[in-house]
Image: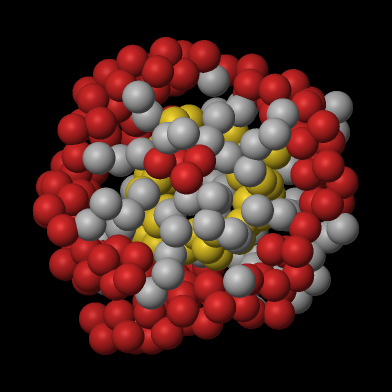
């Protein structure tokens, strides 16, 4: 069992997302370490990108702030080296094909392995084109996380059959962001996926309150929260760490 599968072995997993470098790399490092202590099972780190098409305004703005502050992929790798001196919390990089390709796919995955990144999530790589990434992930032992959405329909079974680690279930259409209502399609998607493969399914996109988290944890193996946390970071800037930690603790308690 690899580290990614292990995170689902102690009950429901809570997976927070933050944009690396917002408001600074130093704060991102503190957030990773303290969110892990507060109960985060896997931390999703967004690599800031100038054209993050799956993201809503909250995460887009965080990307722009991080880039304006000088965040780069190399600085993110350096930060991961520091984190690994004191924490083995599982980490997944969330990025797009363009930054990986520009950096050099082989070099990117090799560095992920060297600094202890466990998985990558690349929303703009459709299932049909994942092979070019997959070969590098396999070479360096990085888990490539598959995503399914309400529009995946009859492709859900195919995607699930080849998925590894866990399946990222996109709860609703459109971009990331906080939502009041989360569609019922997600329960059906998870059922379809699990008919093909016994693999953990975590739900993301739109979850922000402990009530929503508890409800989604009821039908899945874990909950992913991004925009709600990125909003706290935007609101408090360099003073955000205790506020984020409190939020993570509350969310983790809600899904226990």
Instruction: Examine the rendering and report whether any part of residue 185 can be seen.
Output: yes
Question: How many numbered tags mark residues here?
Answer: 0
Q: Nearer the viewer, residue 123 or 110?
A: 110
Residue 78: % across, % down: 13, 47
Residue in front for this viewpoint, 17 or 245: 245
241 is higher (above) or lower (below) than 176:
below
Tell me which residue sits at (34%, 65%) in the image: 36
- Horizontally, residue 102 falls left or right of residue 246, namely left
- Residue that appears at 80% across and 51% down: 186
Residue nearest the observer in this picture, 109 or 254: 254
Q: Quadrant of residue 236?
A: bottom left
Q: Residue at x 74, y 21 (%)?
A: 158
The color scheme shown is secondary structure
Left/right of residue 99 with respect to residue 74 in the rendered view: right
Question: Residue 165: image x %, image y %?
Answer: 53, 36
Tell me where residue 127 appears, x and y as whole percent: 63, 23
Q: Whole-percent x and y of residue 67?
A: 27, 56
In this picture, residue 45 sits left or right of residue 121: left
**Relative horizontal placement of residue 112, taking residue 39 as reference (left or right):** left
Q: Is residue 188 above or below residue 62?
A: above
Q: Is residue 235 visible?
A: no
Q: The C terminus lies in which quarter of the figure? A: bottom right
Closer-to-camera residue (109/114): 114
Name which residue lies at 66% across and 46% down: 201
Above or below for 106 versus 9: above
């Amino acid at each position: 069992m690899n580290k990614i599968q292990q995170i689902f072995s102690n009950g429901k997993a809570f997976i927070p997302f933050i944009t690396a470098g917002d408001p600074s790399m130093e704060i991102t490092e503190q957030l990773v370490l303290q969110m892990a202590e507060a109960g985060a099972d896997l931390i999703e780190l967004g690599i800031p990108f100038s054209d993050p098409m799956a993201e809503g305004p909250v995460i887009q703005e965080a990307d722009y702030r991080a880039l304006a502050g000088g965040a780069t992929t190399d600085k993110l790798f350096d930060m991961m080296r520091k984190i690994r001196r004191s924490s083995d919390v599982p980490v997944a990089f969330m990025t797009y094909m363009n930054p990986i390709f520009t950096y050099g796919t082989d070099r990117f995955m090799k560095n992920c392995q060297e600094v202890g990144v466990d998985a990558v999530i690349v929303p703009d790589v459709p299932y049909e084109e994942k092979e070019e990434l997959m070969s590098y992930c396999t070479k360096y032992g990085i888990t490539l996380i598959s995503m399914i959405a309400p529009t995946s329909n009859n492709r859900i079974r195919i995607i699930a059959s080849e998925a590894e680690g866990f399946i990222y279930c996109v709860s609703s259409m459109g971009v990331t962001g906080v939502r009041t209502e989360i569609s019922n399609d997600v329960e059906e998607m998870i059922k379809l996926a699990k008919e093909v493969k016994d693999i953990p399914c975590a739900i993301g996109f739109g979850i922000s309150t402990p009530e929503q988290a508890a409800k989604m944890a009821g039908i899945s193996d874990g909950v992913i929260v991004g925009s709600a946390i990125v909003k706290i970071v935007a609101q408090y800037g360099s003073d955000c760490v205790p506020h984020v930690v409190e939020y993570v603790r509350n969310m983790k308690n809600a899904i226990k």
